[in-house]
Image: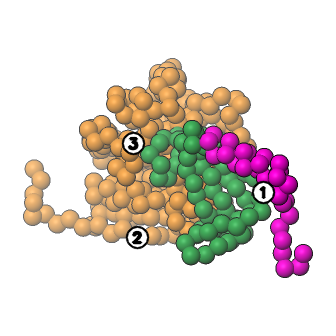
Chain colours: A orange, B green
């Protein structure tokens, strides 16, 4: 039973960490106060940028008992508001997958080095971050749980591949080493329901431990309370499912 | 999800952001997530000067219908200017 007089506290701050090829990048981190051990979470921001929603999301995970790091994947693109930097990256066609995987690996290693982290680390991402999360889980192979929220372009046609995104993440499905939860809106255009079907078929084919929750009346990004896409009922239920999944697999 | 549909035009012009004008050198045109327009995807135009950093940016986010109207309107205005013989395509500088 929750004790209302129990102590709660967290520290949330900007940190530096080693990312791709040893680059020093910055990140936002939040953790519950105390000796732990607490499980860790790596949060992967969406294409629009390393924004306030992701800061709040980082603190939300800390509030729920996770030492959490959200690397700034656009650190190399200069200073400015999340929108201005995000627009610059959008114009450049995004950031290269290899670079993102290197930065995420750095966050994972930092978490695993901390004395108050239990040794279990999960990864969470939305939108392009959902895609990156799936890639990181399959390729870096150092996560104990994956939360993919409406990851678009997990399924890519050959003509959609670019030097920055040379392989469709779905092609790595056989390598997924950890349990996965997927959260999707049935009105989403990317990933559209047929792409989510293909994603699920591939997971099934390889006998992976996964669960998908697909919501009617919701489209892309329905957790974002600062966007018209927000769907309160579906978002509340989705968060419950995500946190229960992590509780089961990381704690 | 981000569509990554984006094109860049090198341009000459000036844009106003707040109180100040600055030289715009690139127009980044994308069909992707807007930041403010309440649509999942929009036609976004960022007039920027990359040399001045990410903050040198004037952003416009349009629906597809609005974007098409804008294109037609620009074409109509340019056609009329050419017809009247007043079209100029060289910047006038202090040294010209």
Q: Residue A147: x percent and y percent?
A: 41, 41
- The relative height of residue B84 versus residue B32 in the rendered view (above or below) is below
Q: How far is disc 2 from disc 3 in space, using C-alphas?
A: 29 Å
Q: Residue A165: x percent and y percent?
A: 66, 42
Q: Horizontally, is A3 left or right of A67 in the view? A: left
Residue at point 82%, 57% (across, down):
B87
Which secondary structure, mark 1?
strand
Residue at point 52%, 26% (across, down):
A195
Residue at point 50%, 28% (across, down):
A192
Which chain does tag 2 point to? Answer: A
Q: Nearer the viewer, residue A128 or A250?
A: A128
Q: Have a look at marks 3 and 1 and say if they share a chain.
A: no
Which residue is under mark 3?
A: A229
- The relative height of residue A188 versus residue A230 in the rendered view (above or below) is above
* Residue range (magenta): B68-96
Asked whether residue A23 appears in the rendered view, the answer is: no
Asked whether residue A171 appears in the rendered view, the answer is: yes
Q: Quadrant of the C terminus of chain B?
A: bottom right
Which chain does tag 3 point to? Answer: A
Which residue is under mark 2?
A: A13
Mark 1 Cα shell of 10 Å, populated few (<14), some (14-19), many (≥20): few
For marks 2 and 3, the one nearer the N-term is: 2
Q: Residue A241: x percent and y percent?
A: 29, 38
Q: Which mark, residue A224? A: none
């Amino acid at each position: 039973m929750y004790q209302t007089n129990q102590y709660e506290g967290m520290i949330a701050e900007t940190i530096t960490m080693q990312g791709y090829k040893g680059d020093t990048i910055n990140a936002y981190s939040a953790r519950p106060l105390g000796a732990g051990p607490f499980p860790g979470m790596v949060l992967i921001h969406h294409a629009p940028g390393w924004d306030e929603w992701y800061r709040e999301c980082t603190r939300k995970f800390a509030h729920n008992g996770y030492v959490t790091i959200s690397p700034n994947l656009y650190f190399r693109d200069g200073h400015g508001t999340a929108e201005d930097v995000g627009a610059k990256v959008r114009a450049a066609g995004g950031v290269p997958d290899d670079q993102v995987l290197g930065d995420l690996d750095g966050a994972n290693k930092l978490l695993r080095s901390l004395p108050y982290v239990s040794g279990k680390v999960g990864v969470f991402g939305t939108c392009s971050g959902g895609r990156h999360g799936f890639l990181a889980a399959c390729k870096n192979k150092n996560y104990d749980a994956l939360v993919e929220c409406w990851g678009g372009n997990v399924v890519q046609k050959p003509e959609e591949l670019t030097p920055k995104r040379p392989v469709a993440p779905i092609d790595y499905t056989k390598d997924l080493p950890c349990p996965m939860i997927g959260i999707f809106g049935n009105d989403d255009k990317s990933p559209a329901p047929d792409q989510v079907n293909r994603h699920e078929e591939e997971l099934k084919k390889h006998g992976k431990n996964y669960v998908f929750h697909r919501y009617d009346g919701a489209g892309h990004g329905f957790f974002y309370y600062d966007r018209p896409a927000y769907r309160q009922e579906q978002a509340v239920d989705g968060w419950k499912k995500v946190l229960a999944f992590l509780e089961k697999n990381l704690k | 999800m981000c569509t990554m549909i984006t094109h860049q035009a090198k341009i000459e012009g000036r844009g106003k952001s707040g109180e100040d004008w600055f030289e715009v050198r690139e127009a980044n045109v994308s069909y992707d997530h807007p930041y403010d327009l309440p649509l999942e995807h929009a036609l976004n135009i960022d007039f920027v000067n990359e040399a001045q950093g990410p903050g040198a940016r004037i952003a416009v986010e349009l629906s597809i219908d609005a974007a098409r109207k804008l294109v037609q309107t620009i074409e109509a205005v340019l056609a009329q200017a050419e017809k009247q013989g007043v079209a100029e395509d060289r910047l006038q500088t202090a040294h010209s």
